[in-house]
Image (cartoon, helix red, strand yellow):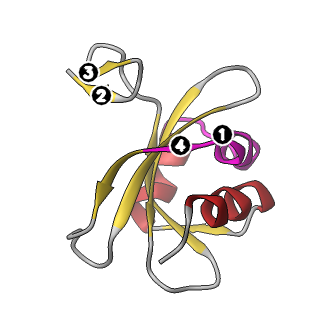
Amino acid sequence: MKTLDDIRRQLYAGEFEFSRHAFKRAIERNISDTEIRQAGADARTIEDYPDDKYAPSSLLLGFTGTGRPLHLQVSHADSNLLKIVTIYEPDPAEWYDYTRRR
């Protein structure tokens, strides 16, 4: 399983791919590769999903260079590229400090 440091390095280096769902969401939400790399550099894990459907995954919180919060769900599947399962800007009405569900 990938460590948080491995995940951060891969996100920052652009060594990631999108699930079909995440690709659609990134376009709909106008989230750029640059923002993903910025948010990924110092992302932290806020939830783990060890029993996720296809492979264990984690929900990360990171911030872009402009301070935009992003949630990235990433798969821990053994692969050269990190897979982003979904990505979105968390709604403050649903999250405390973007880290705990309301």
Q: Is residue 65 above or below residue 71?
A: above
Q: Which of marks 4 and 3 is nearer the N terminus?
A: 4
Q: Earlier in the sequence, mark 3 or mark 1?
A: 1
User: Mark 4 sits on what residue?
Assistant: 44
What is the quadrant of residue 22 in the picture? Answer: bottom left
User: Mark 1 sits on what residue?
Assistant: 39
Instruction: Check disc 1 and give the amino acid type.
Output: Ala
> Which residue shows up at 65% across the image and 47% down it?
40
- Residue 100: image tag: 2
Q: On the rendered structure, is 58 left or right of 5?
A: left
C-alpha separation, residue under disc 3 versus residue under disc 2:
8 Å
Can you tell which of label 3 and label 2 is closer to the viewer? 2
> Which residue shows up at 73% across the image and 20% down it?
66
- Residue 29: image tag: none
Quadrant, the C terminus: top left
Q: On the rendered structure, is 58 left or right of 2?
A: left
Instruction: Check disc 4 and give the amino acid type.
Output: Arg
Tell me the element at label 1: helix
Residue 84 at x, y percent in the picture: 50, 61
Whether 85 is among the magenta residues is: no
Q: Residues within 10 Å of mark 1 (few under 14, many from 20)?
A: many
The range drawn in magenta is 29-45
